[in-house]
Amino acid sequence: MFDYEYEKVLLYAYPKLDELAEAVSASVEVKAVLSFRAVGDCLGIAEKIVKEIDVSRKLRAVREQMDGILARLSGEELFLLEYKYFRRKKRLRELKEKTPRCSERSYFRRQAALLKKISSAFISRGMDERWFLNAFSQYPPFLRVYRALKEGRECSLVRKREKRGMSFSQNSASSRGGTAARLPRRTNADTATTEAQAAHRRKICIPDRAGESVSG
């Protein structure tokens, strides 16, 4: 089973990658200017500065690679990524016509399939989990998010929505005539199962509680 932790780190961070790279570059400049005040030997200080420069370069390289991956996706796929991970209101409005009309179950299946597709695209470019850990071992924000995802704390990384941004069809099946298929009468067992499933969904990031930005 794959949980796609490092892929989610990059997806959540994608809209801010340029800003993050700029912030690291600015930090490098400050440290370089004030290096005469730093405690430690010159070589050690220089090595730390070089590592941060490398992090900034890698953040920009990741943005470039992800731009190429996203350019190959359909409008609906872009909407799904925007809705769950990127959370840019203006872009969501632009993609409004690409909103999928589906059941809640179908929504989760589509998100899972899309995440698998993104992961395959990363790996085909040499961006696997080992690469991620090596590339960003000196970048604490990514590592904190990665550890949180590993520990199953994805919901703690994002803010709750103020209101639902999508609506779901009640029934995914329909008859040949185009009307909703009639469902059998629900038994007590069916009701208990549905309530258990609803309780489980409340513990995870369902769409109307998905977040808007990565903390850290």
Image (cartoon, rainbow, N blue to C red):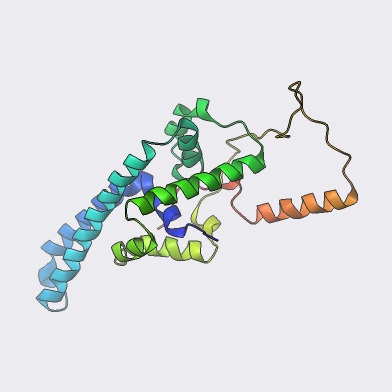
Residue drawn at (42%, 36%) of the image? 73
| Of the pair 48 and 184, the residue shown nearer to us | 184
Query: Which image quarter holds the N terminus?
Result: bottom right
Whether residue 58 is situated above or below residue 77 in the rendered picture: below
| Of the pair 48 and 115, the residue shown nearer to us | 115
Residue 162: image location, x then y, percent: 57, 41
Picture quarter containing residue 101? top right
| Of the pair 54 and 130, the residue shown nearer to us | 130
Residue drawn at (37%, 60%) of the image? 142
In this rendering, would 214 be left or right of 19? right
In this rendering, would 210 be left or right of 137? right
In this rendering, would 102 be left or right of 12? right
What number of labels is visible? Answer: 0
Whether residue 59 is situated above or below residue 47 in the rendered picture: above
Residue drawn at (35%, 47%) of the image? 16
Picture quarter containing residue 196? bottom right
Residue 56: image location, x then y, percent: 23, 55
Residue 78: image location, x then y, percent: 45, 36
- The answer, for residue 167, to whether it is visible in the render is yes
- The answer, for residue 212, to whether it is visible in the render is no
Residue that extends furthest to the top in the rendered view of this protein: 177
Residue that extends furthest to the bottom in the rendered view of this protein: 40
Query: Which image quarter holds the C terminus?
Result: bottom left
